[in-house]
């Protein structure tokens, strides 16, 4: 007691603490007024900065746009490159792989589903035999342009049958 009341006439009174959560102040009441003023100043500064950055002085400046190539022209250019390189096998593989991915997507299979899984699903949807579909999706490389066109037409026919257009 002498530490708390070093003089003989001093009184020491011990008060019980309130229960946790029993006070009348909220968390907002505990934030000092200076903090609220600082947040207000930050908000005003942010609004002024946004207005300053949003200003437009003068006419808009036209910027050079990247060269656009129409999609059909790009496809034709790639086709000419493959034709010049005599890459019929690569062309057929690209057509078949694109069709396999499109069929897998349309039929709810994984994008990397095997050719046999896709062929089974397509055969069930179209009524064709799985071997016939598998031959269209993973057959041998074409020997000339006519065979490449035939492969493309067969894949397109399968695509129409799967989508229900036939």
Image (cartoon, rainbow, N blue to C red):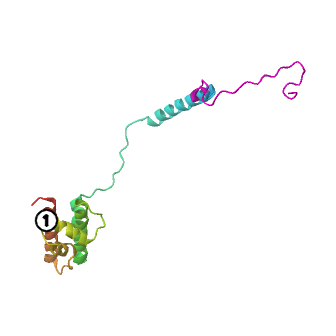
Residue 89 visible here:
yes
Q: What is the x, y in percent for residue 150?
A: 13, 73
Determine the image quadrant of residue 7. Answer: top right
Q: Main secondary structure of the magenta part?
A: loop
Is 129 above or below relative to 29? Answer: below
| Quadrant where the C terminus is found in the figure | bottom left
Provide residue 119's location: percent of width, then percent of height: 20, 70
Q: Which residues are magenta?
A: 1-29
Q: Is residue 81 visible?
A: no
User: Residue furthest toward the right?
Assistant: 8
* Neighbourhood count class around disc 1 (C-alpha, 10 Å): few under 14, some 14–19, many 20 upward: some
Is 143 in the magenta? Answer: no
Name the side, left or right, on which 89 lies relative to 66: left
Question: Badge 1 is on which residue?
Answer: 126
Answer with the quarter of the image where residue 138 lies.
Answer: bottom left
Name the residue rendered at 37%, 37% in the picture. 59
Q: Tag 1, which secondary structure?
A: helix
> Residue at position x 28%, y 56% from top?
68
x%, y% of residue 72? 21, 61
Give the residue at the far bottom of this rendering: 143
């Amino acid at each position: 007691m002498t530490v708390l009341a070093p003089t003989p006439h001093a009184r020491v009174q011990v008060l019980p603490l309130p229960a946790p959560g029993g006070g009348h102040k909220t968390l907002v009441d505990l934030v000092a007024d200076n903090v609220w003023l600082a947040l207000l100043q930050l908000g005003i500064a942010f609004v002024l900065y946004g207005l300053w950055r949003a200003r437009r002085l003068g006419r808009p400046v036209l910027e050079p746009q990247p060269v656009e190539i129409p999609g059909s022209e790009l496809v034709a250019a790639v086709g000419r490159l493959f034709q010049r390189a005599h890459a019929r096998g690569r062309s057929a593989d690209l057509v078949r792989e694109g069709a396999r991915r499109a069929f897998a997507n349309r039929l709810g299979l994984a994008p990397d589903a095997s050719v046999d899984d896709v062929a089974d699903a397509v055969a069930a949807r179209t009524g064709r035999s799985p071997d016939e579909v598998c031959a269209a999706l993973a057959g041998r490389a074409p020997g000339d342009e006519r065979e490449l066109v035939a492969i493309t037409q067969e894949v397109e026919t399968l695509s129409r049958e799967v989508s229900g257009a036939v």
